[in-house]
């Protein structure tokens, strides 16, 4: 797989059907974090749509300052520089459209039933296969730039999966490895299509809500303020989870870790 699947700007650009997203590519064999590099590039004026991608990261970062670990050459590890005309209050739309683009690409190219998990996970059979990290800079009420980082476990063997996080990979779920570049190209296409619809008011919240596996389930939510339990009833346009507490009240939650009360399913 490796010979045909090296992440180079030429290979990524060949057959890429986007107009602007990923048309400029910065590739690294090894870097501390594509996210850190992309943020520096964004502050220095890099063009919208620039893709920063690496075979390996020495300091990959996840949400809530967690580490993002991936053995060299196994994964998709990239960050996108975006300059949306968005109010800060609408920033969750970027996580939504990126999650939907990743989910769609996995479904189309592997037929695996990828789902999303609030707020930023991509899951397969209840296990995490990828995550999204959106970081922004503002100018007044509006976004100046956003860098959206995506990590997807593609060709990790079972032994390489970080067991403590209930993680999985596409290879593990499919029973075979698969080329990363067509997957990346399809993701970029799906993300660009949804992003281009934002100015016309085509908001992704409804599609996102339908793709979230945890809605309608009883959940435990670990937040900075403590643990909450209740029914994950809905998400709103700003991306907040509406949690129906046992006293009947509805609590909007913007950040936290969702633990479904049902165990992850095993592979069929
Ligand atoms: C999460 O689930 O917490 C989000 C993980 C995001 C990881 C990606 S890998 C590419 C980019 N570079 C980073 O350092 N992080 C993001």
Image (cartoon, helix red, strand yellow):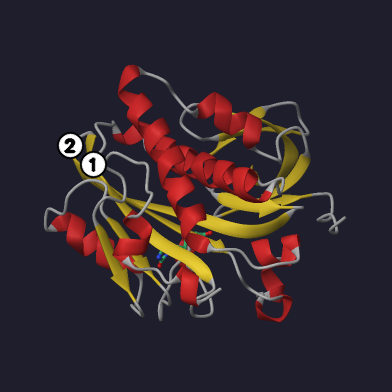
Give the crowd class for mark 1: few <14, some 14-19, many >=20 residues within 10 Å.
some
Q: Which residue is mark 2?
A: 140
Q: Residue at x 70, y 73 (%)?
A: 164
**Crowdedness of circle 2 by 10 Å Cα count: few (<14), some, many (20+)?**
few
Q: Which quarter shows the N terminus?
A: bottom right
- Callout 1: helix, strand or loop? loop
Residue 238 x/y as whole percent: 46, 31
Looking at the image, residue 244 sits to the left or right of residue 194; the answer is right
Looking at the image, in which quadrant does ligand 1 appear?
bottom left
Question: Helix, strand or loop at disc 2?
Answer: loop
Instruction: Return the disc, 2 or 1, that comes first in the chain's sequence.
Output: 1
Question: Where 36 falls versus 13 (above or below)?
Answer: below
Q: Is residue 177 above or below residue 148?
A: below
User: Where in the figure is residue 143, as x and y percent of width and height?
Assistant: 24, 39
State the image coordinates of residue 127 (x, y, percent, origin top left).
72, 58
- Which labelled disc corresponds to residue 83? 1
* Quadrant of res 92: top left
* The residue carrying mark 1 has its beta carbon less than 8 Å from ligand 1: no
Is residue 175 left or right of 243 when viewed as pictured?
A: right
Instruction: Tell me what residue is drawn at x 72 percent, y 45 percent.
Output: 113
The Cα–Cα distance between marks 2 and 1, rounded to whole angstroms, is: 14 Å
Residue at 78% x, 38% y is 217
Work out whether residue 208 or residue 30 is closer to the camera in this orientation and state it: 30
Residue positioned 67% across, 75% down in the render: 161
């Amino acid at each position: 797989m490796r010979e045909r699947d090296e992440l180079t700007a030429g290979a990524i650009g060949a057959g890429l059907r986007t107009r602007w997203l990923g048309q400029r590519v910065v590739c690294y064999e090894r870097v501390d974090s594509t996210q850190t590099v992309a943020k520096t590039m964004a502050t220095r004026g890099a063009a919208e749509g620039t893709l920063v991608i690496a075979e390996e990261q020495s300091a990959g970062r996840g949400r809530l300052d967690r580490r993002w670990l991936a053995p060299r050459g196994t994964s998709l590890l990239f960050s996108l520089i975006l300059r949306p005309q968005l109010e800060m209050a609408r920033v969750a739309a970027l996580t939504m459209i990126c999650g939907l683009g990743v989910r769609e690409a996995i479904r189309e190219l592997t037929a695996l039933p990828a789902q999303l998990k609030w707020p930023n996970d991509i899951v397969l059979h209840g296990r995490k296969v990828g995550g999204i990290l959106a970081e922004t800079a503002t100018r007044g009420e509006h976004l100046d730039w956003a860098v959206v980082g995506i990590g997807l476990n593609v060709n990790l063997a079972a032994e390489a999966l970080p067991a403590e996080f209930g993680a999985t990979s596409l290879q593990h779920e499919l029973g075979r490895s698969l080329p990363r570049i067509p997957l990346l190209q399809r993701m970029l296409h799906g993300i660009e299509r949804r992003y281009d619809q934002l100015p016309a008011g085509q908001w992704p919240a409804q599609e996102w809500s339908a793709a979230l596996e945890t809605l309608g389930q009883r959940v435990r939510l670990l937040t900075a303020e403590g643990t909450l339990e209740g029914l994950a009833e809905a998400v709103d346009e700003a991306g907040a989870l509406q949690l129906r507490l046992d006293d009947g009240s509805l609590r909007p939650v913007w950040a936290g870790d969702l633990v479904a009360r049902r165990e992850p399913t095993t592979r069929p």
